[in-house]
Image (cartoon, grey):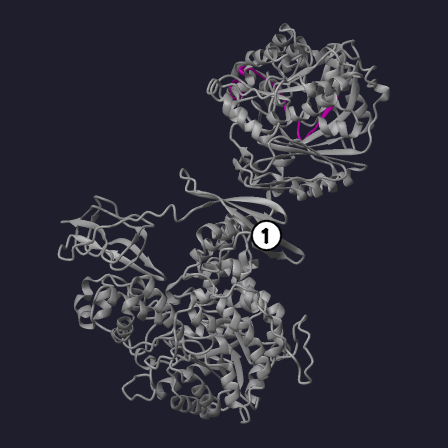
């Protein structure tokens, strides 16, 4: 029936609660019946026309297929909750069981009278019960036959005698078939169970007397557990089967579970179809079955088969059934029960015998004999092996908790020797909590056990099921375990083998990527700081490099010639000597780190570095270093780009093996913004060196050499090149400044004593004027003629080229520059300009200007791709000599000011920065101390505080967290000490450190971190540990994001930042040789109920659908009352931001200074504290709320 017809049928019949759906347009007995009649001409059951299957899921579909082959019309029944299920669509007719709401989802399939009524109303001849539900219900079978219908199964009397396990045991004893010692009859009282254990001891197993499937079953190992196990088993049995009686038997240790497939006809004939090994179970539920049993001794097999047939013949067994046995360690077999129905695992018996068991069932029920069907024992043989795996929507990592939801993607296995019996496994299917979690049975057949095992693994790998969790990772783990490979599993193997749960799941990369792209299509980019879309969205033209003869350089492999060879072969000391012995001035290119940090908010992604990496390895082979890692790029990679910074480092190292890499290390802070325990720094440096880092530029924001030394020693221990760095601040030529030549030389002396290989001079604000550069570098060179000197600057004032040339002339060995298109202003000076300025002098750089321009052509295009992150700077700012705002911070401050509504007050912010610096004691301004000054400046502007007003109100003000951390001493000790009384007034009762912070901190427990990460994420690397040590919350957020969206580093930046266009085709290479071809097809309408949209993509020619929350639809414009500054009881937000923590609730008693809430704006956090003592009232905000400056937070009633 067409989908449209099906939907119309449901819509029409909703009114009278009848979901009958004959699968024909018009008369049920029209053309289709003519086809059936022709097919029926040669059928042995031509007198029968229609069969109903009283079941759901995969087994009705399995039966329908055989029924159609036998020329029967098929009828499905279904609950209201199952109205969209596949079995309903596979039948010729389908009818709802009862009225909507009359039955629960499960009770509908147990409504035997209702099902018989449907059969009679629609001309059904036969009813097949499948398995489960009513398949072993004596009353239902009896009522079917009483209604004049044919029951496809054993006689009701047989069901009654065999369905009761106690009766089955009595039968076995009469037939002299061995049984496990057990109670002689059903047990209803605990005292009876106790009596049995007194005689036979432990362990025992309690089983439901009526029913199976593992329900009502408990293994008891000792007396203390007995009563609770008995009560739970009887309760479960009563709930599942309507009868709480149980029986008890001795429990066998590590037995195999062997079952025999039986077929009997109406004339007393019984044949076996050999055995199956169902030992691989979990809580008595079969997981993987195989046929025949591997390595079962012939004598044991023959005895089991003979006993199975003997038992069946003794009761004149009719139709299909299964005799089940346990085989102990000595290969002795014990009868368990006979299941008077078809089994889930019948498919593997069909595969090895070539017999359609369902066809045999139907034809036997219609009167055929085994002989007529060619199923006498002498004609039955087996060939090869077969496995069946039950693929379920269960999460093995969560104790096989059933998962529910919508199947977003369903791609099944296939090919030679693979058979699938499915139910509701299709894209768009809704998996509900009402029924069994099985999606599909995968059966594989082959000539040997090992061939089938490998075939099954291949089939499992082929499955792609997205939207719900499945047990496929567990099945793969099971099939690759040595015990399973050897075929030696036992019934509790899964429970006894915890290593099976060390799962390697599907990465689900494609669907996660589509989830991100779907969100992008609906909501646009969510990358923080992005304004608008890229100015350039075309394909980037890659540069071509030529040698001196004009021949194109082959860049398919990276260059191997460069300065790094000395480090690798001879070590850091030899490298330092070689640098000092070099006659020219070397260049470090900052394009890969500080240049884009300064101009593009650190947002350049790994993929755009790697795209030009091999060309760079040739074009800059004579460069001293590439500054490419550490500093802000580390946390921004995780925080905003959702990339692993370690992955970036390893990938860059692979394609640029020849040029030394330099990173920025913030002394005792590592790459964090505050001090960490010393062992965190040592661990980090060790991992960075292993991942490919060469030169560590170590600095301390306050030039606190105690802090600096921690980093230098960590680098030395790791085997890296240690560049001890002095931070330059202010104007050394100004006699009023405390940072004069003597000060800098004193810091350099201490750095040299630390054993640093190289001296770095870090001019973060770009305030090192040419004459000062000559004086400072010249003085250091004179004092330390053998010390390599490297100078880093920013071109904020426009004098960067002149200053770097002056450094070179004064004796600097290396200076910093950036590619021309990413140079100037807050970035580094132009590499082309510096190289040209040094050309022809004794300070030649050794770089090829043609190559530099070729590389720059790439970066000119890339900058346009990242245009949404431009700060809007139009030229140099000589005012930097007054406000001294570092280059990288300048662009960040402009961005933060606009985010906090202070964009129009930028000039005021710059002035406030000067005042804030003076208030803090004129400190060295390098990350993170520059952030302290910036936070205080923004605080002053947002609260309209002047220099004098802040000093006056300091005892009552809630200073930004970074300011308090600085005053506390968490960033080290500033030169000249802390400003008093401001420090004491701001800190109030907080501690004051007099030594470096690391001495107050306990070492990190790395084993504890590893355990936590393994438990949380299923595994971790040492670099994960290092990331977590630096930024625990950032790392957790990154992992949470990538769990949802996957690895986005493979996505081209164009589609990372910008919405794809409808019908625009693009490709994403997940890994070498695995490419997704994608096309956005449509964005669906907004659902008013859910606030979501469906987004449709075509992926490799297949339509995929993702559901996305429309962020615009969910926005609520909340207008908050403002705090009355004249009313001391009202507490207002000191600035715009997000409430990240609430420390009180209505009615809380607070003392003056107690924290009320924590506010976050960009990277600045601020504690809102009580201005006076009292009781909290009218708390008007909650965690996650956005607030504007002076929005009312709460009232404090005295």
**Rendering coords of residue 603 (x, y %):** 47, 65
Q: Residues within 10 Å of mark 1 (few under 14, many from 20)?
A: many
Foreground pick, 1085 / 632? 1085
**Residue located at (40% from left, 37% from top):** 1089
- Tell me if residue 364 comes above or below residue 1071 in the rendering: above
Q: Judge from the rendering whether residue 350 lies leftward or rightward of residue 74; answer left or right.
A: right
Q: Judge from the rendering whether residue 368 lies leftward or rightward of residue 434; answer left or right.
A: right
Foreground pick, 1016 / 799? 799
Q: Which residues are magenta?
A: 236-261
Foreground pick, 73 / 1154? 73
- Which residue is under mark 1? 1078
Res. 1038 visible in picture: yes
**Rendering coords of residue 1143 (x, y %):** 28, 50
Give the quadrant of the N terminus. top right
**Residue located at (42% from left, 82% from top):** 750
Number of callouts: 1
Q: Secondary structure at mark 1?
A: strand
- Tell me if residue 694 comes above or below residue 171 in the rendering: below
Q: Judge from the rendering whether residue 1055 lies leftward or rightward of residue 75; answer left or right.
A: left
Foreground pick, 590 / 855? 855
**Rendering coords of residue 420 (x, y %):** 69, 33
Q: Outermost residue, right direction?
A: 378
**Rendering coords of residue 1001 (x, y %):** 39, 63
- Tell me if residue 161 comes above or below residue 783 in the rendering: above
- Tell me if residue 227 comes above or below residue 581 in the rendering: above
Res. 936 visible in picture: no
237 within the magenta span? yes
620 within the magenta span? no
């Amino acid at each position: 029936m067409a989908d449209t017809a099906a939907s119309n049928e449901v819509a029409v019949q909703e009114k009278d609660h009848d979901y009958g759906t004959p699968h024909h347009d018009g008369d049920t007995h029209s053309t289709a019946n003519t086809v059936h009649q022709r097919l029926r001409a040669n059928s042995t059951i031509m007198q029968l026309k229609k069969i109903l299957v009283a079941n759901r899921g995969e087994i009705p579909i399995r039966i329908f297929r055989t029924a159609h082959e036998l020329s029967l019309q098929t009828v499905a029944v279904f609950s209201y909750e199952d109205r969209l299920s596949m079995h309903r669509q596979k039948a010729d007719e389908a009818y709802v069981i009862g009225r909507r709401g009359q039955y629960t989802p499960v009770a509908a399939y147990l409504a035997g009278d209702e099902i018989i009524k449907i059969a009679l109303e629609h001309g059904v001849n036969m009813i097949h019960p499948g398995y489960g539900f009513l398949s072993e219900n004596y009353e239902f079978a009896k009522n079917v036959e009483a209604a004049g219908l044919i029951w496809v199964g054993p006689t009701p009397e047989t069901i009654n005698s065999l369905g009761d396990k106690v009766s089955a045991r009595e039968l076995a004893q009469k037939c002299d078939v061995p049984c496990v010692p057990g109670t002689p009859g059903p047990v209803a009282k605990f005292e009876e169970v106790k009596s049995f254990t007194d005689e036979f001891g432990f362990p025992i197993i309690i089983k439901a007397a009526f029913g199976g499937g593992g329900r009502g079953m408990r293994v008891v190992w000792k007396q203390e557990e007995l009563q609770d196990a008995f009560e739970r088993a009887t309760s479960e049995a009563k709930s599942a089967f309507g009868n709480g009686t149980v029986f008890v038997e001795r429990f066998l240790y590590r037995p195999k579970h062997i079952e025999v497939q039986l077929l009997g006809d109406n004339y007393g004939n019984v044949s076996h179809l050999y055995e199956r090994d169902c030992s691989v179970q979990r809580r008595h539920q079969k997981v993987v079955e195989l046929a025949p049993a591997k390595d079962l001794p012939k004598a044991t097999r023959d005895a089991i088969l003979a006993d199975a047939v003997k038992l069946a013949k003794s009761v004149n067994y009719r139709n299909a059934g299964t005799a089940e046995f346990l085989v102990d360690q000595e290969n002795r077999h014990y009868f368990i029960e006979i299941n008077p129905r078809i089994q889930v695992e019948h498919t593997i018996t069909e595969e090895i015998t070539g017999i359609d068991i369902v066809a045999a069932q139907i034809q036997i029920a219609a009167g055929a004999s085994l002989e007529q069907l060619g199923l006498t024992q002498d004609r039955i043989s087996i060939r090869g092996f077969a496995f069946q795996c039950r693929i379920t929507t269960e999460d093995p990592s969560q104790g096989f908790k059933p998962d529910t939801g919508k199947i977003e993607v369903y791609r099944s296995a296939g090919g030679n020797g693979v058979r699938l019996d499915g139910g509701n496994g299709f894209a768009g299917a809704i998996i509900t909590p009402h029924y069994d979690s099985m999606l599909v049975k995968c059966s594989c057949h082959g000539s040997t056990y090992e061939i089938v095992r490998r075939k099954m693994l291949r089939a499992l790998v082929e499955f792609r099921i997205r939207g719900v969790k499945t047990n496929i990772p567990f099945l793969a783990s099971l099939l690759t375990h040595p015990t399973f490979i050897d075929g030696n599993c036992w019934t509790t193997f899964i429970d006894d083998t915890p290593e099976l749960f060390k799962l390697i799941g599907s990465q689900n990369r494609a669907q996660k990527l589509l989830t991100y792209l779907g969100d992008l299509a609906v909501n646009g980019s969510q990358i923080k700081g992005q304004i608008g879309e890229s100015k350039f969205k075309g394909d980037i033209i890659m540069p071509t490099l030529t040698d001196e003869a004009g021949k194109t350089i082959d860049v398919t492999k990276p260059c191997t010639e460069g300065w790094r060879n000395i480090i690798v072969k001879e070590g850091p000391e030899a490298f330092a000597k070689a640098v000092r012995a070099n006659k020219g001035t070397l260049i470090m290119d900052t394009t890969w780190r500080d240049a884009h940090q300064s101009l593009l908010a650190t947002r350049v992604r790994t993929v755009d570095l790697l795209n030009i990496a091999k060309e760079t390895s040739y074009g800059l082979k004579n460069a001293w270093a590439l500054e490419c890692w550490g500093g802000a790029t580390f946390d921004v990679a995780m925080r905003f780009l959702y990339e692993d910074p370690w992955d970036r480092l390893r990938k860059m190292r692979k394609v640029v093996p020849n040029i030394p890499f330099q990173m920025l290390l913030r002394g005792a802070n590592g790459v964090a913004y505050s001090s960490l325990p010393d062992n965190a720094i040592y661990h980090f440096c060790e991992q960075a060196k292993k991942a490919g880092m060469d030169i560590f530029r170590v600095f301390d924001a306050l030039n606190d050499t105690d802090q600096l030394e921690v980093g230098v020693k960590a680098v030395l221990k790791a085997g890296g090149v240690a560049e001890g760095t002095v931070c330059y601040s202010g104007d050394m030529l100004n006699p009023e400044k405390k940072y004069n030549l003597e000060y800098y030389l004193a810091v350099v002396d201490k750095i040299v004593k630390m054993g640093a290989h190289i001296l770095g001079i870090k001019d973060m604000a770009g305030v090192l004027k040419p004459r000062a550069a000559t004086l400072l570098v010249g003085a250091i060179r004179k004092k330390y003629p053998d010390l390599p000197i490297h100078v880093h600057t920013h071109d904020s004032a426009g004098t960067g080229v002149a200053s770097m040339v002056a450094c070179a002339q004064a004796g600097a060995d290396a200076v910093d520059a950036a590619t021309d298109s990413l140079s100037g202003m807050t970035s580094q000076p132009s590499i082309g300009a510096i190289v040209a300025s040094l050309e022809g002098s004794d300070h030649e750089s050794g770089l090829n200007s043609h190559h530099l321009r070729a590389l720059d052509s790439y970066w000119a295009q890339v900058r346009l791709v990242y245009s949404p992150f431009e700060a809007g700077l139009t030229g140099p700012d000589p005012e930097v000599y007054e406000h001294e705002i570092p280059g990288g911070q300048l662009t960040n401050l402009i961005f933060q000011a606009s985010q906090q509504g202070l964009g129009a007050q930028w000039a005021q912010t710059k002035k406030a920065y000067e005042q804030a610096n003076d208030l803090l004691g004129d400190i060295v301004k390098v990350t993170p101390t520059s952030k302290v000054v910036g936070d205080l400046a923004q605080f002053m502007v947002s609260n309209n505080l002047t220099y004098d007003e802040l000093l006056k109100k300091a005892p009552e003000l809630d200073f930004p967290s970074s300011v308090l951390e600085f005053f506390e001493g968490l960033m080290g000790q500033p030169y000249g000490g802390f400003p008093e009384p401001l420090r004491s007034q701001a800190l109030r009762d907080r501690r004051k450190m007099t030594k470096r912070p690391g001495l107050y901190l306990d070492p990190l427990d790395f084993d504890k971190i590893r355990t936590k990460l393994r438990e949380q994420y299923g595994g971790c690397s040492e670099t994960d540990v290092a990331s977590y040590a630096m930024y625990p919350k950032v790392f957790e957020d990154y992992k949470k994001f990538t769990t949802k969206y996957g690895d986005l580093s493979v996505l081209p930046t164009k589609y990372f930042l910008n919405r794809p266009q409808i019908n625009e085709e693009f490709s994403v290479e997940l890994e070498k040789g695995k490419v997704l071809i994608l096309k956005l097809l449509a964005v669906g309408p907004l659902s008013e109920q859910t606030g979501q949209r469906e987004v449709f993509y075509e992926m490799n020619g297949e339509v995929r659908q993702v559901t996305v929350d429309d962020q615009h639809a969910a926005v609520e414009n909340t207008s908050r009352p403002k705090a009355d500054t004249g009313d001391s009881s009202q507490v207002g937000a000191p600035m715009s931001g997000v409430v990240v923590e609430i420390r009180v609730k209505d009615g809380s008693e607070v003392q003056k200074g107690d924290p009320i809430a924590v506010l976050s704006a960009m990277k600045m956090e601020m504690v809102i504290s009580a201005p006076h003592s009292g009781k909290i009232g009218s708390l008007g905000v909650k965690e996650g709320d956005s607030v504007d400056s002076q929005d009312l937070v709460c009232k404090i009633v005295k």
